[in-house]
Amino acid sequence: MADGHRVDLSSYTVSELEELARDVGQGIAKKRAQYRRSLPLVEGSGPVYRNPANACETWCGRGEPPAWFKHALARGDSPETLLI
């Protein structure tokens, strides 16, 4: 935490912690997307999305999406969570 305090998670149930983790992940993805949108767009600047299961697999966001990207969306990931 910014002020150096830690949150005591010991009283949470597993399902509550899983929900919290999902919420935090979505919050991070939104912040990352906001940051990326604030950057100037550079033509041909390279990959935009990265496969979380294999960091060597990337996609620039143009043309036909690769299979790993399609699979990630099918399992419920949002494009924002796959941003580099």
Image (cartoon, rainbow, N blue to C red):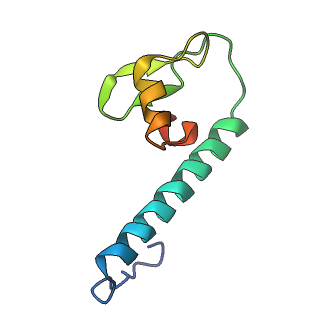
The number of numbered badges drawn on the structure is 0
Q: Which residue occupies the foreground of this view, 12 or 30?
A: 12
The residue furthest bottom is 11
Q: Which residue occupies the foreground of this view, 76 or 38?
A: 76
Tell whether 63 sits left or right of 56: right
Residue 83: x, y in percent?
52, 35
Relative height, residue 9 to residue 56 (above, below): below
Tell whether 62 sits left or right of 20: right
On-image quarter of the N terminus: bottom left
Q: Residue at x 39, y 82 (%)?
A: 5
Residue 43: x, y in percent?
68, 12
Q: Which residue occupies the foreground of this view, 33 or 12?
A: 12
Which quarter of the figure has residue 20?
Answer: bottom left
Residue 61: x, y in percent?
59, 19
Residue 76: x, y in percent?
48, 44
Q: Residue at x 70, y 37 (%)?
A: 37
